[in-house]
Image (cartoon, rainbow, N blue to C red):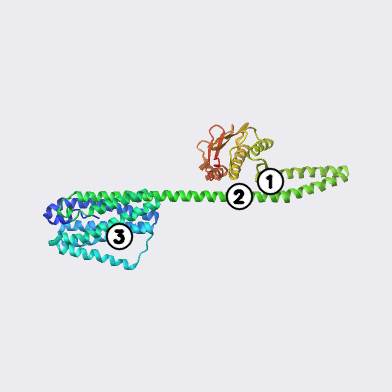
Amino acid sequence: MGEGGTFGAMNQALPLAAGTELADAIFQVAITAGLALFAVILHRWLRERWLAWWAGAWTLYLVRLLAIVAFLRTGDLAWLFWHQVITGWVALAILWAALVFSRNARWRGWYLAFAAFPLALGWIAVNGLDQFTLVAIPMVALLSGATLWTGWVFWRHADRTGSRGSRFVAIAFALWGLHHLDYPFLRAKGAWAPWGYFLDILFELAVGVGFGLMVLTDLAARLAARREELTRLQSRLVRAEEGERRRLARELHDESAQTLSAVRLEVGMLREQSDPATAEGLGRVVDLLDRGIGGIRRVINDLRPALLDDLGLLPAIRALADDVTSRGGPAISVQLPEALPTLGDEAELALFRATQEALSNILRHAEAPSASITVLAEPTRVVVIIADRGRGFPAGTDLATFERDGRLGLVGMRERIGALGGEVSVDGADGVRVRVEVPVVAR
């Protein structure tokens, strides 16, 4: 938003200006075009309203520089007039973009009246050069005041949000606004040429870097909020799933299991009253009913293990290992601590489900002669390690591969444990080793 020695150029020969100040101005045009493009890209990416205003302000800044380049090449005062006018508009546009960013300000039609001030001041600046200091002061006051106000807006935003990027931008605008104050005394007399342009470029780059930091900070905050939201959603889904498991287990127990038990009792009574041939057939029916009842009880236990609710995690894990062996799975050695630190109900259930899923995979896929379960009770976390000596995973396989293939057991385990702040790691190089850990509940 600086002048870069504009009026100083009028006190020198235009050919000299064209050779020195013109090159500096063109260099600033290139830098400003890059910043305008950066703002446009950010707006197209993030679709934020304030970024649209910011892109518009930098584009207007670019037009302002093109006007001074045209003046330096032609010496036509019309270009100087529009340079002065657009300079004021740029200051107001950047201030407005800051207000939209910080306060979500809304546009009002009567705000266009402010555009008249740069028009009037530009006309005075071009037509009152014989009293330069007097005519320059109003324009400098507008330019510096708007820039300092912009810095204040970003400073207040940094106070509210703790954004380091906003603080950086605020300092850059504050220094830029103070830099504008030297215009009537130094830059207008050519004292800052070419350093006036270089300082303006430095301030532009500082503001651009600051906005990049703000965008990155904002994206990080959004990502953290989205992650927290997904964690809450995952927790709700887990609770809903466990509620449905509990409902199904209760219905199977109260309806199907009880009905089959009643049928078994009736068939048993009929067998006692029947002839030997009929009794033999009814005996086979009783055996089938016993198997059916046993299967239902296993399903009920898988859906909602009563042992976990009644005795806790450690006995439930030992019962899981025994159940896998009884189904024809490998012998499983279990190493458990005497007690566990404080875990929430959800954490205990998540560790149980993770162990259940890992043992189910061993039973179905591992072809392992043996397996082990180790539970480690540490001061800040509980770790469960399920390992087997089976065939392991194919080379290059990871959790993402299972997810793409629709094998979501391990992926679901990771999501369930991750929702509690824990971690799941899987190593399939020599057999399969699943390591699950959850944090201890703070007392």
The amino acid at mark 2 is Glu
How far across and how far down the image is residue 317, in percent?
Answer: 64, 38
Q: Earlier in the sequence, mark 2 or mark 3?
A: 3
How far across and how far down the image is residue 147, in percent?
Answer: 28, 56
Q: Quadrant of residue 13?
A: bottom left
Q: How many marks?
A: 3
Using the image as rendered, state which of residue 263 and residue 141 is in the foreground. 141
The amino acid at mark 3 is Ala
Tags 3 and 1 touching, CB below 8 Å: no
Using the image as rendered, state which of residue 349 and residue 440 is in the foreground. 440
Residue at image location 84% in from the left, 46% down from the top: 269
Indicate the secondary structure of the residue bearing disc 2: helix
How far across and how far down the image is residue 175, in percent?
Answer: 27, 51
Q: Which residue is mark 2?
A: 241
Q: Earlier in the sequence, mark 3 or mark 1?
A: 3
Q: Which residue is mark 1?
A: 300
Q: Is residue 126 left or right of residue 213?
A: left
Q: Marks 3 and 1, how far apart in space?
A: 68 Å
Q: Which residue is mark 3?
A: 93
Tags 2 and 3 touching, CB below 8 Å: no
Using the image as rendered, state which of residue 170 and residue 431 is in the foreground. 170
Q: Quadrant of residue 306?
A: top right
Query: In the rendered image of this protein, does residue 2 appear above or below residue 273?
Result: below
Residue at image location 13% in from the left, 57% down from the top: 10
Q: Closer to us: mark 2 or mark 3?
A: 3
Q: Which mark is residue 332?
A: none
Q: Closer to us: mark 3 or mark 1?
A: 3
| Residue 242 at least partly seen | yes
Q: Marks 2 and 3, how far apart in space?
A: 53 Å
For mark 2, does the 10 Å Cα neighbourhood hold few (<14), some (14 to 19), or many (20 or more) residues? few
